[in-house]
């Protein structure tokens, strides 16, 4: 049954991708918002999203929760509509759909440093564009990703990411470990989203409540003396975005490895919290982080 469902999903996605390709970026994004708003909630119960929002914002009203969830689905729909048009966005090319780059001074500092870099963020706005921005800015990033469960759709999404975002795609888990180590050992930067629940995670405070969080970035930062750099993208309106590259996190190493891993990861979670508070309607509230 699961295979049949995956195949039907695949056919539907390809059908809409073809429509999006024909009608262009702006109309695709608008149509995607409509699809997300009215059809997204049919595929995922809002229970987890509501629980997550109440954990992050304990004093929020029921009406505000419903607005946040609706806006989240609209954004998810826009991402869907924008997938086949990722090549039409640029942080450097004025002729393309402009992504405004904030605080450019940090980029030159990062390019001149002698350490590997781990860019980290979460599922904000159209999160796929962050890797594209970093690639355009001259970073040979290896983008760490989690393969889709849908075996038919996953190759399509991998193709889109390699063509439009970053040619070097590194699968999470044991399959991608050798490729990851080879990439960072050569002093190349990595990019990952760290706001999903993974089986290899540990419990780290997130909005003052323990949440399953990957410690892989902290481990790499200690082993390779890598910089942990927060990046963030904000949807301003429709297909307009702002992209932020912040200064590296301050890392204080001690003789207690486990404590260092915990503290570094906690600081990373805190940074993700800051980003969520800036733009809560455009974060993906569907992951069961506090399970």
Image (spheres, grey):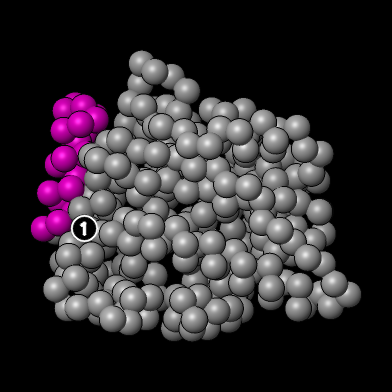
For residue 170, say whether it is visible: no
Residue at image position (33%, 76%) is: 57
For residue 123, which quarter of the picture? bottom left
Give percent across and percent down for residue 108: 67, 31
Tell me what residue is drawn at x 35 percent, y 21 percent.
96
Question: Which residue corresponds to the image point at 45% horizontal and 40% vertical from the top-left?
Answer: 243
Residue 63 lies, in percent from the top left, at: 14, 73
Q: Which residue is mark 1?
A: 71
- Above or below 115: residue 195: below
Residue 22 falls within the magenta-colored stretch? yes
User: Can residue 221 be seen from the camera position used here?
Assistant: yes
- Compared with 207, 152 (above or below) is above
**Which residue is at a point 75% across and 58% down the rendered structure image?**
221
Residue 103 vs residue 238, the one in the foreground:
103
Q: Quadrant of the C terminus?
A: bottom left
The magenta segment: 19-38
**Magenta part, dominant SS:** helix
């Amino acid at each position: 049954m699961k295979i049949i469902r995956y195949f039907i999903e695949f056919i539907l996605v390809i059908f809409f991708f073809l429509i999006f390709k024909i009608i262009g970026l702006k109309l695709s994004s608008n149509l995607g918002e409509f699809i997300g708003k009215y059809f997204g909630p049919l595929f995922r119960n809002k229970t987890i999203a509501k629980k997550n929002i109440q954990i992050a914002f304990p004093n929020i009203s029921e009406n505000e929760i419903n607005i946040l969830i609706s806006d989240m689905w609209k954004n998810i729909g826009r991402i869907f509509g924008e997938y086949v048009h990722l090549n039409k966005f640029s942080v450097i090319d004025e002729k393309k759909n402009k992504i405004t780059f904030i605080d450019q001074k940090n980029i030159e500092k990062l390019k001149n440093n002698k350490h590997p870099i781990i860019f980290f963020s979460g599922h904000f706005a159209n999160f796929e564009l962050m890797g594209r921005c970093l690639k355009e800015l001259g970073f040979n990033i290896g983008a760490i990703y989690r393969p889709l469960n849908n075996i038919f759709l996953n190759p399509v999404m991998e193709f889109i990411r390699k063509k439009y975002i970053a040619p070097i795609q590194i699968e999470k888990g044991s399959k991608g470990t050798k490729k990851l180590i080879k990439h960072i050992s050569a002093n190349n930067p990595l990019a990952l989203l760290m706001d999903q629940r993974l089986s290899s995670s540990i419990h780290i405070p997130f909005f003052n409540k323990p949440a399953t969080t990957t410690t892989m970035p902290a481990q790499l930062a200690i082993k390779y003396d890598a910089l942990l750099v927060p990046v963030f993208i904000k949807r301003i309106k429709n297909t307009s975005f702002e992209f932020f590259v912040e200064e590296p996190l301050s890392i204080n190493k001690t003789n207690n490895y486990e404590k260092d891993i915990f503290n570094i990861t906690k600081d990373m979670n805190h940074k993700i919290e800051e980003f969520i508070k800036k733009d809560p309607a455009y974060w993906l509230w569907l992951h069961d982080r506090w399970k």
